[in-house]
Amino acid sequence: MAKTPSLQDQLLHAAGGRGTDDDLRALIARGADVKGRAGAGPLNWAVNSGRLSTVQLLLDAGASIDGDHPEHTPLMQAKRAEVARYLLERGARTDGREALRGDALDFTIDRADDTEHARVLLDHGFRVEPRHLISATKKRRTGIVKLLLDRGGDIEGIDRDGSSLPRDRARVPRERHGAATPRARRARVARRPDHRLRATRRTRRRPRARQDDR
């Protein structure tokens, strides 16, 4: 016989998208703890699922907006820009940092080229660090790379571990790097009329000499 999930497990599952907000209210009324433990509380589950209404409900019920673990804050785990914005507007701290993966902006860069999400974080006090630009460039997050450069990112910057942008600069937008990428230069040359004419001439075979002319 299957074991009945605990009240706390039911709350986590409901917060993670397997239940409605009414289910959550009922579980909270029965005494389920909205705070959770070790960075895996219901609020973390809710921000992962992207349910803004659930995030609001849990915060109103007393959930800690920063969780209980500085390396696993709800803001770092938020997958949608509107959820991140809501957390920040309600006072979420911006100094949470995971030892290996970095801060909330690093998490955003890791997930996708979500320019709006990155913009929300920058608008609320996140600073552009060399590692952000390095990571976004390596992961080909073109939109975020442009945004970081617009917000003061330095292509010559060196991260704390000594890493920089040596060979990856070819993927930095041309208007910020000061030179076109090799692919862009080849494409530009190929579009020139004189280039196309020379290419056509090279492909034409020279006529063979007739026997009578020898």
Image: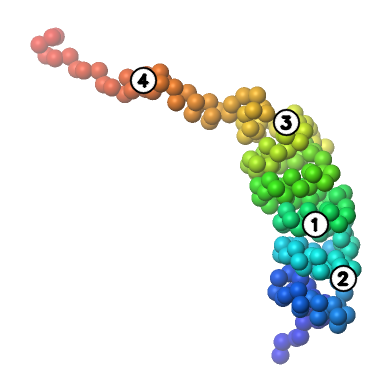
Q: Earlier in the sequence, mark 1 or mark 3?
A: 1
Q: Nearer the viewer, mark 1 or mark 3?
A: 1
Q: Earlier in the sequence, mark 3 or mark 2?
A: 2
Is 170 situated left or right of 13 in this image? left
Is 142 situated left or right of 52 in this image? left
Residue that badge 2 annotates: 61
Above or below 6: residue 130 = above
Q: How many numbered badges does the structure rendering display?
A: 4
Q: Are marks 3 and 2 in contact (CB under 8 Å)?
A: no
What element does badge 2 sit on? Answer: loop
* Spatial CA span between label 4 and label 3: 38 Å
User: Going 76% across and 36% down the picture, which residue do you hit?
Assistant: 151
Above or below 160: residue 90 = below
Q: Quadrant of residue 13?
A: bottom right
Residue that badge 4 annotates: 197
Horizontal and vertical percent position of residue 38 = 86, 65
